[in-house]
Amino acid sequence: MVSSQTTSKPEALDVIIVGAGISGISCAYRLQSQLPNTRFTILEGRSEIGGTWSQFTYPGVRSDAIMNTLAFPWHLYPHPEPIADGSLILDYIKDAASKSRIAERIQMRHRVSAAEWSSSQQQWTLTVDHEGKQKFYTARWMILGTGYYDYEAPLQAEIPGLGNFKGKVIHPQFWPKDYDYENKRLAVVGSGATAVSLLPLLAEKTSELTLIQRSPTYIIAMENKSWTHKHLPPPLASACQRLYYTIHQHIYVAYCGNFPDSAKERLRKDTVKRLPKWLEQDPHFKPRYNPWEQRMCTDPDGIFYEALHRPNVKLITGNITNFTETGVQTQDHETGKIDTTDLDAVVTATGLNMKLGGGIDIRVDGKTLSWGKKYIWNGAMIEGVPNMIFVFGYANNAWTIGADITAFLAARLLKYMNRKGLKTAVPQLSAKDATTETERIFRLNSTYATLAAERLPVYGKTGVWRPRTRPPRDYVHARWGNFRSGLHFST
């Protein structure tokens, strides 16, 4: 609980960045390098930088994105493997922040609880909780690098009878550091990236491991090696990989969208040859949706498929009907038969709870910001909200690419306003642009995204309100395109 103690005078800055993960550090670097006289700080609520990669510590945690696209373009990723585990990513982020001297601008354990914009003063006032004391900051601009999910509470999926179970229940977002799962009987409930990452590591030590999925997902096995690092100097190899995978991913997503049947058949053939004989591709690896309508999981060196060949691993595709005190009951989709599996622990890898703004109480002239259904300007600002940038990456490409595009746009906008002596910029939606047709910010139809849709802002169909979906085009626009359209400026 925060005490009533406060600092006497607010610290005044040009820009405050909230969050010291990939988004915040990316924006900080562009500000530092392109606007060197800008007074800014990064406020981080936790005791460690890294965002997602500090929060998640479950066994096997890793990124599905290729590291040459997830890494910062301004800081070389030193390892040749395209897919990296969470600890390597966290070390990399810390190294990037340290060597760029951005770490010196980060204030740890500074949790922003409220942010109020005053039009009369043309500034934000932030209320910050720091180790039991309340502090205040003022800034011309606020940049939210807070990600898109709730750090405090995961998605509460409805699992029938879970309250009956007397064993241990674990959500991967809060994996207990001291939990020893060796020789335990575990069930992982879920079929997404977290479950796919967990299974190979858990399979090495558990006596029995059961993956329970209500519906399957697409899992792409890829060789986790880079030929460029063998033949090219590291900086050139990294640049080539970044360019290749950025464009490759964009083209592949477009291919899946335009030729779904062809994409499904290619994925089916690759999956069939990797499965053990006791597992059929249909129904266990035949998703109900087309490729890239939801996230597709990456399987480095095929370790997920290899784990399915272990004698202690079982996969169930069906509905959970109930939990008993000692296990789970599942019903087969095809036969309707109910089976019981005895367990010591259940891991609920059922998704994230989406939330923008890190739970900050944001107000504009006393009126609370409601994110839901607000239009998004250039993928970076919200209609009617002055001097606030929020960082949102790509759902179907590396997050960092989108974060860096936002950072370039922010730097250009601030440079322009400084040069012209402008104090505020507000995205304003014209009657022409305010159509009834909108698109979701998170275009995938995953359960957690669908559940959060009403709480999230939306894209329009025209001009600066259109979705950011094409990294090459979006990058060119952020660097050299018209960034003033749709904004109202004042001195």
Image (tube, grey):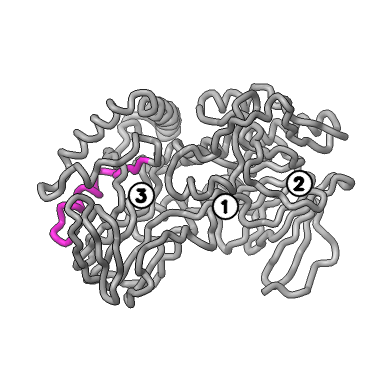
Relative placement, left or right, of 462 versus 201 is right
The image position of residue 373, as x and y in percent, is: 63, 41
The secondary structure type at the circle numbered 1 is: loop
The image position of residue 62, as x and y in percent, is: 38, 50
Asked whether residue 25 appears in the rendered view, the answer is no
Amino acid, disc 3: Gly
Q: Which residue is mark 3?
A: 192
Upstream in sequence: badge 2 or badge 1: 2
Residue at screen point 57% across, 64% down: 47
Q: Residues within 10 Å of mark 1 (few under 14, many from 20)?
A: some
Q: Which residue is mark 2?
A: 39
Amino acid, disc 2: Arg
Instruction: Pick the quarter of the image with the C terminus.
Output: top right
The secondary structure type at the circle numbered 3 is: loop
Viewer-closest of 259 and 55: 259
Circle 3/circle 2 CB separation < 8 Å: no
The image position of residue 328, as x and y in percent, is: 26, 67
Residue at screen point 73% across, 71% down: 133
Q: Of the numbered discs in the image, which one, if any, rests on residue 355? A: 1
| Vertical relation: 343 (above or below) 71 | below
Residue at screen point 69% across, 35% down: 411
Residue 309 in the magenta stretch? The answer is yes
Q: Of the numbered discs in the image, which one, if any, rests on residue 103? A: none
Amino acid, disc 1: Lys
